[in-house]
Image (tube, rainbow, N blue to C red):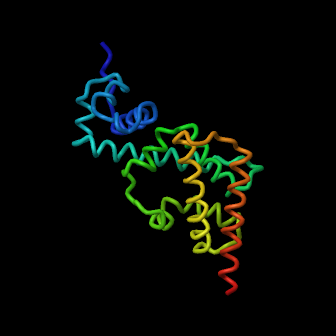
């Protein structure tokens, strides 16, 4: 008889993310995660003392997926526009994960300004900064403006209030970006 497969903490987190993706974060529990892994609930409870700690770990896993998704940029696309469109597209393609990340209350940083100052956002800010020629502080301010716009856009789409049209979304994002960059340059020359 072959030895039993060892269920790792990483496997459990991946399974919890998959439960959130398919059914919603509200359905993450020992039973649904163990069903996803085709195992008993014992490994889940061995690695996680509480379901809340499992949900926080799943949130971090979903956040890593989201960041990687945002940074998948076609070589011919403006990086800022690409990141913004990817943010909106993520809400279209992964509505349950979008809700988990941005509407569940599991985020460690609850305010957008705190998020703009986080180390986790540095890869995205660096791409934006390189595309704009702004200082890092100006880039953070532009990010806040564009992020508010993109998040609102994505939330409306994820909630079913609007259909996704990439051409229109790109034009709206371009306008938001141009306006935010122009405002940053104007503030610099005051």
Rendered location of residue 43, percent (x, y):
26, 31
Residue located farthest toward the top when viewing the structure as drawn: 1
Q: Quadrant of the N terminus?
A: top left
Q: Which of 122 and 168 is in front in this view?
A: 168
Rendered location of residue 104, percent (x, y):
39, 47
Q: Nearer the viewer, residue 87 or 164?
A: 164
Rendered location of residue 100, percent (x, y):
42, 44
Q: Is residue 82 left or right of residue 90?
A: right
User: Relative to 135, is 109 above or below?
Assistant: above
Q: Nearer the viewer, residue 2 or 12?
A: 12
In which image quadrant can residue 93 be found?
Answer: top right
Residue at the spot x=63%, y=53% of the render? 84
In which image quadrant can residue 131 be found?
Answer: bottom right
Q: Quadrant of the C terminus?
A: bottom right
Residue located farthest toward the front when viewing the structure as drawn: 161
Residue at the spot x=37%, y=26% of the render? 36
User: Relative to 111, is 154 above or below?
Assistant: above
Q: How many numbered badges does the structure rendering display?
A: 0
Rendered location of residue 78, percent (x, y):
73, 55
User: Relative to 40, is 128 above or below?
Assistant: below
Residue at the spot x=45%, y=66% of the render? 114
Residue located farthest toward the bottom when viewing the structure as drawn: 190
Residue at the spot x=55%, y=46% of the render? 156
């Amino acid at each position: 008889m072959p030895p039993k497969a060892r269920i790792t903490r990483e496997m459990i987190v991946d399974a919890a993310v998959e439960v959130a993706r398919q059914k919603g974060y509200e359905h993450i529990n020992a039973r649904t995660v163990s069903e996803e892994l085709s195992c008993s609930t014992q490994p889940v409870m061995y690695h996680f003392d509480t379901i809340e700690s499992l949900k926080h770990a799943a949130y971090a896993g979903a956040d890593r997926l989201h960041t990687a998704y945002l940074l998948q940029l076609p070589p011919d696309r403006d990086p800022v526009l690409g990141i913004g469109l990817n943010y909106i597209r993520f809400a279209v393609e992964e509505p349950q994960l979008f809700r988990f990340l941005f509407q569940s209350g599991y985020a460690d940083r609850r305010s957008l300004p705190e998020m703009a100052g986080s180390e986790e956002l540095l890869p995205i800010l660096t791409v934006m900064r390189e595309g704009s020629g702004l200082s890092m502080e100006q880039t953070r301010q532009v990010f806040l403006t564009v992020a508010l716009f993109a998040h609102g856009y994505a939330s409306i789409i994820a909630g079913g209030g609007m259909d996704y049209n990439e051409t229109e979304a790109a034009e709206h994002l371009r306008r938001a970006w141009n306006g935010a960059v122009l405002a940053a340059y104007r503030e610099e020359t005051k």
